[in-house]
Image (cartoon, rainbow, N blue to C red):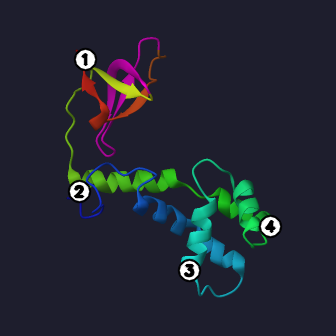
């Protein structure tokens, strides 16, 4: 069991509760400063931010959504909301997870692997190994030199 992620030993994602909370807390200081008053109800603010922020909307849309629940956003708040990033929080969590779990790559440079991309299986050759994030760069035939797809170690399988 993982100490940092007690609910699972799986790789952290943007949907992992601890990752999402870290991302929300990342913009909290700027949000509180924007309020220009003391923050006494941090939990309520985090809930409202969590309700309107996700990886797919922009600061303007999130500000409009906050307006619908009683906030009075302005352009400064839009900029703050634009800085929200679940991906940055996920990347930090993955690096911490790798240090804790210490996964080992099953394949080496040049190995041919297969992995799932949405509903189809894709195959390619490992061209780079990133130990700090436990990922391969896998190039498919036809990819430009130096290009490829990030594939998590646990998602790659040997070619049949």
Precedes in sequence: disc 1 or disc 3? 3
> Which residue is found at the position 57% from the left and 50% from the top?
55
Q: Which span of residues is magenta-colored?
A: 119-142
Q: Nearer the viewer, residue 95 or 64?
A: 64
Say if 50 sits above or below 124 in the image.
below
Asked whether, in this view, residue 76 is left or right of residue 85, the answer is right
Marks 2/1 in contact by CB < 8 Å: the verdict is no
> Label 4 crowding class (10 Å Cα cut-off): few <14, some 14-19, many 20+?
few
Mark 2 or 3: the one toward you: 3
Compute the Cα span from label 4 to label 3.
20 Å
Mark 2 or mark 3: name the one nearer the start of the chain.
3
Decide if residue 152 is on the left or right side of residue 108: right
Q: Where is residue 149 shown, x and y percent of the image? A: 43, 28
Q: Are marks 2 and 3 in contact (CB under 8 Å)?
A: no
Name the mark on residue 1: none
Q: Position of residue 37 (x, y in %)?
A: 69, 86
Whether residue 130 appears in magenta in the rendering, the answer is yes
In the rendered image, which residue does mark 3 sit on?
42
Could you classify mark 1 by the number of other residues whose Cα lies within 10 Å: few (under 14), some (14-19), or many (20 or more)?
few
Asked where in the image residue 123 lies, by quadrant, the reply is top left
Q: Which residue is mark 2?
A: 100
Give the residue at mark 4.
74
Q: CA distance from mark 1 to mark 3?
A: 50 Å
Identify the residue position indicated by label 1 in the image. Answer: 159
């Amino acid at each position: 069991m993982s100490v940092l992620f007690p609910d699972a030993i799986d790789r952290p994602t943007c949907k992992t509760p601890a990752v999402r909370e870290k991302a929300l807390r990342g913009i909290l200081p700027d949000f509180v400063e924007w309020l220009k008053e003391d923050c006494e109800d941090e939990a309520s603010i985090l809930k409202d931010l969590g309700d309107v922020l996700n990886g797919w909307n922009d600061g303007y849309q999130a500000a409009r959504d906050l307006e619908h629940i009683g906030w009075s956003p302005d352009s400064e708040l839009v900029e703050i909301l634009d800085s929200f990033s679940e991906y940055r929080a996920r990347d930090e969590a993955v690096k911490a997870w790798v240090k804790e779990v210490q996964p080992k790559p099953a394949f080496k440079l040049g190995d041919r692997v297969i992995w799932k991309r949405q509903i189809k299986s894709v195959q390619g050759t490992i061209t780079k190994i990133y130990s700090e994030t436990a990922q391969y760069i896998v190039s498919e035939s036809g990819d430009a030199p130096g290009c490829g797809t990030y594939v998590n170690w646990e998602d790659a399988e040997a070619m049949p």
